[in-house]
Amino acid sequence: MFAPRFFVSMLGALVAFAIATYYLTGSFASTAVQTLICAVLIQVGYFFGVLFLIWKEARERRKLSPTIQAAATEAATEEKQSAKFSLRRVGRPRHFNS
């Protein structure tokens, strides 16, 4: 939901809605009120849509969190072991490395 694209699309939809409403009712005041109500409903829908996307992403992150933490712990342990191993080798001739 890219906001600028959404606002341009919303404006286009509201203009089409206003033209159709004016054609059906013939009243400028009624068209303005109904278009304003439509704009508010679209904004409320956009707000709840963004909230839903945030909720879904948070749920996915919580679901993956134990997996990510386990992988990070494993990588840190592996890194510590390789650091110890490489420190033992510093300054030794090649034929003494085991």
Image (cartoon, rainbow, N blue to C red):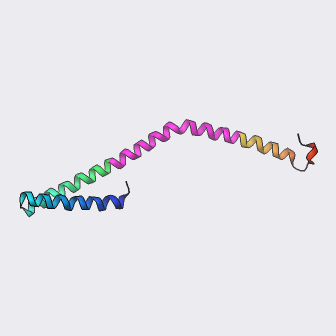
Image-based side of 15 in relation to 53, left or right:
left
Residue bounds of the magenta highlight: 49-77
Up/down of 29 relative to 89, above or below: below
Q: Which residue is rendered at x = 61% and y = 36% of the image?
A: 70
| Percent coordinates x, y for residue 56 in the rendering | 41, 42
Q: Nearer the viewer, residue 24 or 40?
A: 24
Q: Main secondary structure of the magenta part?
A: helix
| Residue most extreme to the left | 26
Residue 23, picture quadrant: bottom left
The number of numbered discs placed on residues in the rendered structure image is: 0
Residue drawn at x 9%, y 62% is 29
In-image side of 58 versus 75 (left or right):
left
Q: Quadrant of residue 36?
A: bottom left
Q: Image height check: is 94 above or below 20?
A: above
- Please state, as top left, top right, bottom left or bottom right, where the C terminus lies in the image: top right
Q: Is residue 85 left or right of residue 36?
A: right
**Residue 88: image x %, image y %?**
86, 44
80 magenta-colored = no
Q: Is residue 58 magenta?
A: yes
Q: Residue at x 32, y 51 (%)?
A: 47
Residue placed most toward the observer, 33 or 21: 21
Residue lying at 58% horizontally and 40% vertically, measured from the top left: 68
Q: Position of residue 4 (x, y in %)?
A: 35, 62
> Could you say which quadrant of the image residue 33 lies in?
bottom left
The image shows residue 73 at horizontal and vertical percentages of: 65, 39
Position of residue 30 relative to residue 71, above or below, is: below
